[in-house]
Image: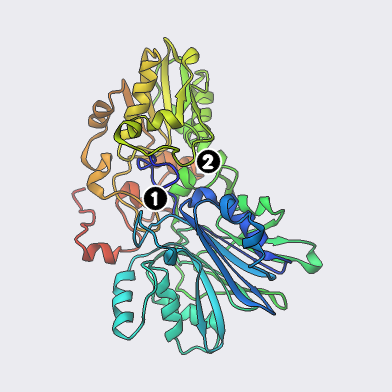
Amino acid sequence: MPPAHPFDDDKLHEECGIFGVLGVQDAANFVALGLHALQHRGQEAGGIVSHDPEQGFNSARRFGYVRDNFTSTDIMETLPGPLAIGHVRYSTAGSKGQTAIRDVQPFFGEFSMGGAAIAHNGNITNANALRRELIERGSIFQSSSDSECIIHLMARSLQRDIPARMEDALRRVEGAFSVVAMTRTKLIGVRDALGVRPLVLGRIGPEENSGWVLSSETCALDIIGAEFVREIEPGEMVVISQETGVESRRPFRQKKPRFCIFEQVYFSRPDSILGGRSVYETRRQIGVELAREAPVEADLVCPVPDSGTPAAIGFAHESGIPYGMGIIRNQYMGRTFIEPTEQIRNMGVRLKLNVNRALIRGKRVILVDDSVVRGTTSRKIKEMILDAGAAEVHFRIASPPTAWPCFYGVDTPQREKLLAATMSEDEMRDFLGVDSLKFISLDGLYRAAGEAGGRNNSCPQYCDACFSGEYPVEPADMIEKGFKLKTAAE
């Protein structure tokens, strides 16, 4: 199945979204709403598993958007019960672009003490080695997803209950992950020791008889009217039941957290809260820092919609240059309605974005975007702005140059296809054909994220490997395939 926007291959694709609910009637309906709010994190496919005391476990997995599948009464009636988990995905591991339905999570396993389902956001960096070991010992894999390794490791554990088996399994796993899982009576959430990927806990319903929610982001709590309780801490496992409430465990050795800073820049929705801080406010502050670091004389500040909007607002406010919607997004793009031939593919950006000619004509324009990956979309947007009569085009980018691939659950191109991996900032400016190009500095990004002193280079506060090349977890599988880590000279 093609991605939702066939012309979006110049962006980093969000990794996945996970959601779980315990203790409400028809929990799957709440999960469907939560997944709808997390649709920005994965638009390729989605799945829900529920449990009903009388009917047992049931599941539904579908390609496409949540709204096109999990709003159907026929489907939702097959998912009864007070406990359910769900997942929306991009193919960050396994068969990219050629996903089979068997790769769609949540995955389900039947153990001697009962069944369990699991959904996972992130990437297991030693999945290939684990898969080889498990196959040699007799495991039979049904999917190409690295997440299935967790189910097989749980099956081989000698622990007496499913949460303990999951602890066993996750201690063997390297990488970055947040997990939601369920047994017949329990909802389980886990974050890896570094807390690279997000996971939050919420409560729904009256306090004396409340249900519980686990979600990748707080915005999905809002859609079902759930109260945000707290973030699951890095290295924490919560086991939730109606009888005992939330029980916290610590299956991993404690480490200094390294939350993904690109969640602040791009992945998370601007109305979410991360680390007690508004994502919108962080993105607006990035624009403020950009205006201080890279001022330029111009007539208009325009965002590249939608992810560049908060930074453009901050840039305009700090610089005193008027803000304007110079580019309008077609909200009804969806999947292209005609076969994307080469001619149509070249029109792709125009199908999705249109220039506000009356506003742009004769102006010196600052375009604010969240990132530059391959640079192909940036060049087309620049051409559209010039065609509309702009006098000058200046790019300001709300993240540092993306020069390294992510191996922690984000679908990034190979390093040689990243513009910043092969070009200097000046070379990128010439390649894009703009009057100026400036990226926010890594220190500036950290300041915008609330770190007043900038980046602590000896012990960074975030995972910023896509910018710095410093991987907090060694990508063992990729090194085995020949990937070269950053050298001291770089």
Q: Callout 2: helix, strand or loop?
A: helix
Q: Nearer the viewer, residue 404 or 52?
A: 52
Residue 251 shows in the view: yes
* Circle 1 residue: 456
Residue 293 shows in the view: no
* Circle 2 residue: 282
Q: Amino acid at mark 2?
A: Thr
Q: Are marks 2 and 1 in contact (CB under 8 Å)?
A: no
Residue 444 occupies quadrant: top left
Q: Position of residue 352 (x, y in %)?
A: 45, 32
Q: Position of residue 100 (x, y in %)?
A: 40, 62
**Crowd band around label 2 with a 10 angstrom C-alpha radius: few (<14), some (14–19), many (20+):** many
Taking 287 as reference, is 207 left or right? Answer: right
Taking 203 as reference, is 263 left or right? Answer: left
**Crowd band around label 1 with a 10 angstrom C-alpha radius: few (<14), some (14–19), many (20+):** few
- Residue appearing at x 51%, y 38% in the figure: 283
